[in-house]
Image: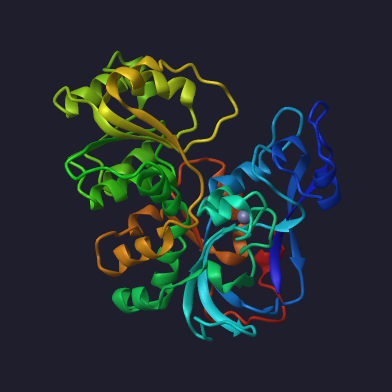
Amino acid sequence: MHAIKLVADWSPRPGYAITPAETKAGKARMACHVFKNPRLEPVVVPDPSPGAGEVVVRVRACGVCGSDTHAIETDAQGYMIFSGPASFPCILGHEYAGDVVAVGAGVRNLREGDLVTAEGMLYCGVCEACRKGMFNQCVRLDMVGFSSHGAYAEYVQVHERHCWSLNRLADKLGSAQAACEHGALVEPVGCSYNGMFVSAGGMIPGSHVAVFGCGPIGLGAIALARATGAATIIAFDVSQARLDAALRLGADQAYNPITLARDGGSSPSALMRELSDGWGSDMVVEAAGAAIQTMPEIEQALAPGGKVVYLGRTGERAPVMLDVLVSGASKIVGARGHAGGGVYPQIVRMMEHGVLDLGALISHRMPLSEAAPGVDRSRSREDSKIMLVADPDAPSQGAAPAAWSRV
Ligand SMILES: [Zn+2]
Ligand SMILES: [Zn+2]
């Protein structure tokens, strides 16, 4: 099959305490301190075949994630920006859906022809974190597309325990392809759901919600807040295209804090107070990864009992006025990932029953064979989601379309 591999040089950063286990496995705990000079390479590799308990999924749709963007971007020393665990070379791509084309021994719940989407966090199931139900905190976590081969490829091999059916969603949408495109969005939106509802314990209907950062995670948070009864939703981002997407997905107001400051407009915290009649925001989702800028605004406009769901990633320390948490009996909750907690099936169910429509998240479609130009396009950070879609009539074997070999 054809695929796009990310290749990078193993070169631990001076000062990074590499462990013997990392060296032995060739798997870095933090890719940004170990891998240099990342590049995408087209490859032809044998078609996967399913092991016991596994299926092979023919990829019909795969989203381009900000993590993929971070994996090809580098800092001044040439190290990749992506900070998660990784083992390169690896076929990139983790937000995917498709149809089951081969079923391994002992698979109980899936059969050939089923449409599925699959979790990207491959938890081990036996470490203490897993056995406490904290699958996203698995100590042996593998991530599809970073330490286990991903879906910028014609096929992916995956254990059935990570797969969720999209058959009913296809019935609802009247199209297998549409179900796969919506199904591929469960991964990023699952991170929002996991943070807001599993880790932070949710919000009550009638809440005022603020979202900082309108990439796919922030946009997912907006759609989920609207679907679950938020009274008001205010959104902030520095890209006009993403602010437009925020309004399409259900935000009442959307602002660019940089142009506001330049034009002498109100601060984000003042706007949060204004929209909530002075009460403040009951739930704030930080999906910008810009804590140094966002936390001072958030702490000025957090409602009593408010929750800050911190989903962005930054390696920087941010000063936070913790007294706000004391006086307001408020909390800051961190979260990552989307595994466990019923996240995947609940989101699919919301889509099946018309409670949640994520279609407006997709801002651009490209052929799956153009995964490499797709990742390149994502560097502009203007799209809300680039969706790579397979040509259903393409032969699964034989000569590559020109694009698979173009990087
Ligand atoms: Zn992702
Ligand atoms: Zn585990």
Quarter assignment of residue 123: bottom right
Asked if 127 appears above or below 335 in the picture, the reply is below
Horizontal and vertical percent position of residue 159: 60, 71
Residue 192 seen in the figure: yes
Residue at 49% across, 81% down? 109
Front-most of 85 and 330? 330
Residue at 65% across, 39% down? 83
**If the image is split into quadrants, where does the N terminus sit?**
bottom right
Asked if 59 appears above or below 224 in the picture, the reply is below
Front-most of 332 and 44? 332
Q: Is residue 116 left or right of residue 141?
A: left
Residue 61 seen in the figure: no
**If the image is split into quadrants, where does the C terminus sit?**
bottom right
Horizontal and vertical percent position of residue 104: 64, 83
Residue at 51% across, 49% down? 337
Horizontal and vertical percent position of residue 56: 61, 77
Asked if 133 appears above or below 85 in the picture, the reply is below
